[in-house]
């Protein structure tokens, strides 16, 4: 009998509590909206958990980056200014200064992280994975927001974490809330069925709760805020997850213990490692995050200290501090810059830090996992939304009272997307320089008196050295991660050994280099669209590892291919040497279609794993929580194929009864206000004779409105009377 089956039998003996409410009693907590411009509080307090010498750490990082940048800019000036600077050359130097400064900061920070890791970690907040688990005295809510996700996968993740927590002996300190913002009516009913089944399997009737909002106002931020206002007063901490999050019970307990031990800490952010990926593209991300992600994360944690950032998930937060400090305002104007804040996490951390709460990133704390987009197309869709959210932060940057480090986090988030159009402008500037050299007649003897002619030239030898140095600064964090991995026996084995890890690193570097210019164009277009007022909207994130139709790949990347061909032709027309200089960028764009299609394939990803490439320790020796979640997800997927919502309710009287009980109370409506979807849906449902007819005329929004109304539910289920599976449910009408 396998482990999952033993777990089910052991916990099933606890019995069923069918009458247990789906939500606990409300314990309201005020969460006022924070002012950005009119805030009059004191300067952010210095947290007690802030490490000594933090000013020197930051001086070392920024001073080192500035020194490297100054040296590189000096060399760039020597390359271009052999006989004086033209306007184009001066512009290139300005763009080079910004771009090189960006990668120099990452390089110096990664060097700091490498030193921290080689010395055994920073030991922030006294968290020691080798120490005994702390006893817990406070209450923590584990919040799992979901938006049109696969209910079976979500339930499997929750169950795996519950069982892992149970093994620590600290489970009574935790409650779990499945917070649904789902709009798809079929997924909604499947969520409710998965929730009820999860309660039965785990016996978690007193600690496992479900709530769906009628309107997903303000997306995930509004989802969490609504929970705080209704239930937050009953819990000292909340552990915020994403639908693909997994944490071990030990990690959860240690995070909660650290919050109890440090009352001035408002938020602890773990470092989620990517797992469970199968496509070649996702496995490249997974390997890169595992090999050199810790180097980068430990570096920023070293100089962030208690002024760190929040990534929106896999983080534990002091509930009252969050409610008092992080109520998000609406930004003035219309989307994409106005409206509710999309990238809420950076802003919430900044507002908490403004009120004096410490915010820590603790990357040495293991046992925190997530997933990643399976393809370049899926990554681009997510990135478009993140781009809009980060550019929104331009309106938050001037907010009164923010800590300087919080402003830096916001600015760096903005720069992470502006870097792409800057790189594109830099390439265009290089082409203009080539045109200047070839087609503009040099002015050997300018009008001003000069003893020597003006010979426009570029120092090619110095340019080659500068290019090599830039590549070293850009790629060094990868090789620092490799050195660190080879220094640890468990990690060395987990990434394929010295040879396998090198081959994997080279493969990841090669494909990432080809993908980089595609993402440059994607992000540049996104920035342009946002600056011209185009809203990205909000679509469910694709998490599956399914292949992508070639037609979809062509539609997504044909323009990138055409742009690459045009860029290559223009560069070659200017100069063959310019073409060779731009060849890596041109090649990445030209092969965008086959590259995207091939890297989205599962067979290539699994083939790489089969020959020992792109391995990570979590798949060589899987942590129990990952293995358990995956086994449960497979079993639930096999047991419960997707079913239309109304037929599911009509077939299962218990689910129908539970669904009616879980409907939220009718909201108070202003006089004259009409729920158009509900009114139209009721009219359509009353004008047909069968459920098939109703499903043929109802829109998704109308169907969801009917399922959210007791009378609407009764009408839809009554229409299923010709379906044999509906017979047991008719007694409830």
Image (cartoon, rainbow, N blue to C red):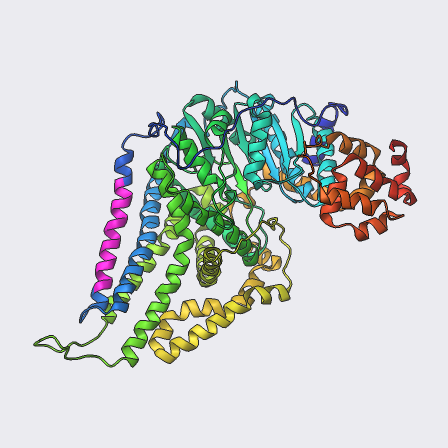
Q: Image point 44% across, 63% down: which residue?
A: 517
Side of 596 where 213 appears, left or right:
right
Q: Horizontal and vertical percent for residue 99?
A: 33, 57
Q: Image point 81% across, 53% down: which residue?
A: 696
* First to last magenta residue range: 59-77
Q: Nearer the viewer, residue 207 or 221?
A: 221
Q: Image point 52% across, 68% down: which residue?
A: 559
What secondary structure characterizes most of the magenta part? helix
Question: Quick check: is 436 in the magenta stretch?
Answer: no
Asked whether the viewer can see residue 299, the reply is no
Task: Give the vertical position of 448 relative to 298 (above or below).
Answer: below
Q: Nearer the viewer, residue 170 or 696?
A: 696
Asked whether the viewer can see residue 582, the reply is yes
Q: Horizontal and vertical percent for residue 713?
A: 80, 38
Where, by quadrant of the figure, is residue 91 drawn?
bottom left
Side of 495 where 571 appears, left or right:
left
């Amino acid at each position: 009998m396998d482990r999952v089956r033993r777990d089910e039998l052991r916990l099933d003996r606890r019995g069923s509590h069918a009458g247990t409410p789906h939500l606990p009693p409300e314990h309201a907590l005020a969460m006022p909206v924070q002012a950005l411009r009119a805030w009059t509080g004191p300067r952010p307090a210095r947290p007690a958990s802030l490490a000594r010498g933090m000013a020197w750490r930051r001086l070392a990082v920024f001073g080192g980056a500035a020194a490297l940048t100054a040296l590189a800019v000096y060399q760039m000036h020597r390359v271009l200014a052999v006989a004086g600077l033209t306007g184009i050359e001066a512009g290139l130097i300005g763009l080079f200064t910004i771009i090189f400064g960006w990668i120099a900061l990452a390089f110096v920070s990664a060097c700091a992280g490498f030193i921290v890791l080689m010395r055994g970690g920073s030991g922030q907040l006294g968290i020691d994975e080798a120490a005994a688990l702390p006893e817990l005295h406070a209450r923590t809510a584990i919040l799992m927001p979901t938006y049109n996700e696969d209910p079976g996968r979500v339930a499997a993740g929750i169950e795996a974490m519950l069982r892992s927590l149970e093994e620590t002996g600290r489970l009574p300190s935790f409650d779990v809330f499945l917070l649904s913002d789902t709009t798809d009516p079929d997924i909604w009913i499947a969520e409710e069925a998965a929730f009820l089944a999860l309660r039965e399997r785990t016996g978690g009737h007193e600690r496992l709760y479900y709530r769906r909002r009628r309107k997903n106002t303000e997306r995930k931020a509004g989802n969490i805020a609504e929970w705080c206002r209704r239930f937050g007063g009953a819990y000292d901490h909340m552990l915020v997850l994403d639908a693909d999050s997994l944490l071990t019970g030990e990690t959860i307990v240690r995070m909660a213990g650290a919050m109890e031990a440090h009352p001035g800490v408002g938020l602890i952010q773990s470092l989620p490692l990517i797992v469970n990926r199968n496509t070649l593209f996702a496995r490249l991300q997974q390997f890169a995050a595992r090999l050199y992600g810790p180097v980068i994360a430990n570096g920023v944690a070293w100089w962030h200290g208690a002024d760190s950032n929040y990534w929106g998930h896999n983080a534990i937060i002091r509930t009252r501090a969050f409610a008092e400090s992080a109520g998000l305002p609406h930004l003035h104007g219309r989307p994409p810059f106005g409206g509710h804040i999309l990238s809420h996490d950076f802003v919430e951390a900044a507002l908490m830090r403004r009120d004096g709460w410490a915010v820590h990133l603790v990357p040495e704390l293991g046992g925190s996992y997530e997933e990643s987009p399976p393809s370049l197309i899926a990554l681009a869709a997510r990135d478009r939304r993140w781009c809009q959210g980060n550019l929104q932060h331009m309106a938050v940057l001037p907010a009164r009272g923010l800590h300087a480090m919080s402003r830096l986090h916001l600015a760096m988030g903005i720069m992470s997307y502006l870097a792409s159009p800057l790189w594109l402008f830099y390439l265009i500037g290089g082409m203009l320089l080539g045109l200047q050299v070839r087609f503009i007649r040099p002015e050997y003897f300018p009008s001003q008196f000069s003893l020597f002619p003006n010979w426009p030239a570029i120092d090619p030898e110095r340019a080659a050295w500068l290019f090599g140095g830039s590549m070293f600064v850009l790629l060094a964090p990868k090789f620092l991660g490799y050195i660190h991995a080879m220094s640890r026996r468990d990690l060395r084995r987990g990434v394929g050994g010295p040879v396998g890890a090198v081959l994997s690193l080279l493969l990841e570097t090669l494909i990432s280099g080809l993908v980089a210019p595609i993402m440059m164009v994607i992000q540049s277009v996104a920035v342009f669209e946002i600056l011209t007022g185009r809203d990205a909207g909000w679509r469910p994130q694709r998490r599956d590892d399914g292949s992508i139709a070639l037609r979809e790949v062509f539609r997504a990347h044909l323009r990138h291919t055409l742009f690459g061909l045009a860029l290559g032709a223009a560069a070659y027309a200017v100069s063959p040497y310019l073409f060779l200089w731009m060849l890596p960028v041109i090649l990445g764009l030209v092969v965008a279609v086959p590259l995207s299609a091939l890297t989205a394939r599962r067979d290539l990803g699994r083939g790489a794993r089969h020959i020992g490439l792109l391995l990570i320790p979590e798949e060589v020796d899987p942590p129990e929580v990952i293995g358990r979640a995956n086994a449960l997800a497979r079993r639930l997927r096999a047991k419960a194929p997707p079913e239309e919502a109304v037929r599911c309710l009509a077939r299962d009287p218990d689910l129908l009864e539970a669904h009616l009980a879980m409907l939220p109370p009718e909201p108070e409506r202003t006089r004259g206000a009409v729920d158009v979807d509900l009114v139209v849906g009721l009219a359509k449902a009353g004008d047909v004779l069968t459920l098939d007819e109703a499903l043929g005329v109802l829109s998704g929004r109308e169907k969801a409105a009917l399922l959210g109304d007791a009378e609407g539910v009764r009408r839809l289920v009554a229409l299923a009377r010709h379906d044999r599976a509906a017979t047991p449910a008719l007694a409830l009408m």
